[in-house]
Image (cartoon, rainbow, N blue to C red):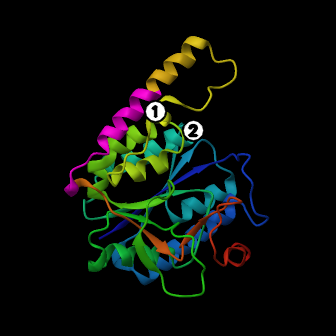
Amino acid sequence: MKLHVVYRSHGGENSKGRPDWYSKLVGLRSFCRAVELARDQRPAADVEVVFLNDGPIPAERLELMGAWGDPVTIDGGSNRRSYLQGLSLARRRGWAAGDVVLLAEDDYLWRPEALVALVDAAADPALAHADYFAPYGDDVEDDGQPVVWRTVVSTTSTFAVRVGALREDERLLVLCALSGGDFDYTSCLTLQGRPRFGPRQLLEHHAPAPGTPPWRAGARRVYLTAVRAVVDLRSVRRPSRRRTLVGAAPALATHMELGWIVPGPWERIATA
């Protein structure tokens, strides 16, 4: 089994609240350190990294990417579009069905042992039933205990998946991404055979951008209602196609956003 990584990155920032020790460079350095440890301790996994860069990347980060993987520039223009291009890489690159691909975002901080633990989990016969793996896992206190993988309901757009399952699920994941809102949560529920949208959510949507013509706003409402209805129908999966998502406890990575930082020695890791 090989581990492939699609690390999605963007040169800009957004307005999310961040801890004092946050930077995308810090996150990238922590990830490269995890790659180094996995290549050293689990050479059979032959860790391959593709840096999927949506637009220009600052020189210091780009130099680091070139030292640890294959930087590829795309013109996505949004988180959703770059995510969809990341999904398609498993098909376009011809990776083996038994391999694992990790889709990673650039505002996460990683433990040094994160990829070693992910490789071990994917190869563990006791977790052969698991299709998806969440390194940003359960919100549990970190008291130094070994990582345990257990079934979770949802995770973010930073997750790992067996390549064979991803190929089978790609169309459904694309459909979920087009449903608006928190499509990562929608994807996790739908893949596990859980309906995501109730009657109210089918009909009520986020307000369109200011200045949107009424006809376009109306068309958007009709479109989202139709897509969400199809997503709910697709969640009625036969048992053999319902996916199992397991998350790491304690977490192997954390989202570097205030309110979403899981327990762990993250400030120490960031400043090391």
Determine if residue 272 is in view.
no
Q: Given the image, on which type of amino acid does mark 1 rest?
A: Leu
Vertical position of residue 96 compared to residue 236: above or below: below
Q: Which residue is mark 2?
A: 78
Q: Which residue is mark 1?
A: 202
- Which secondary structure lies at badge 1? helix
Q: Quadrant of the N terminus?
A: bottom left
Q: Is residue 155 magenta?
A: no
In which quadrant of the rendered view does residue 144 lie? bottom right
Q: Position of residue 242 (x, y in %)?
A: 27, 55
Q: Position of residue 139 (x, y in %)?
A: 57, 70
Q: Given the image, on which type of amino acid does mark 2 rest?
A: Ser
In three-dimensional space, the C-alpha distance between marks 2 and 1, rounded to whole angstroms, equals 24 Å
Q: Position of residue 44 (x, y in %)?
A: 33, 77
Identify which residue is drawn at 27% across, 45% down. Answer: 236
Q: Quadrant of the C terminus?
A: bottom right
Identify which residue is drawn at 63% across, 57% down. Answer: 107
Q: Is residue 237 magenta?
A: yes
Vertical position of residue 197 compared to residue 263: above or below: above
Q: Which of 95/155 is in front?
A: 155
User: What crowding class fits label 2: few (fewer than 14 Cα within 10 Å), some (14-19), or many (20 or more)?
Assistant: few
- The secondary structure that most of the magenta stretch takes on is helix
Left-right relation of 1 to 180: left
Q: Which of 123/213 is in front?
A: 213
- Which secondary structure lies at badge 2? loop
Determine if residue 179 is in view.
yes
Left-right relation of 107 to 201: right
Q: How many marks?
A: 2
Q: Which residues are magenta?
A: 224-240
Of marks 2 and 1, which one's residue comes earlier in the chain?
Answer: 2
In which quadrant of the rendered view does residue 251 lie? bottom right
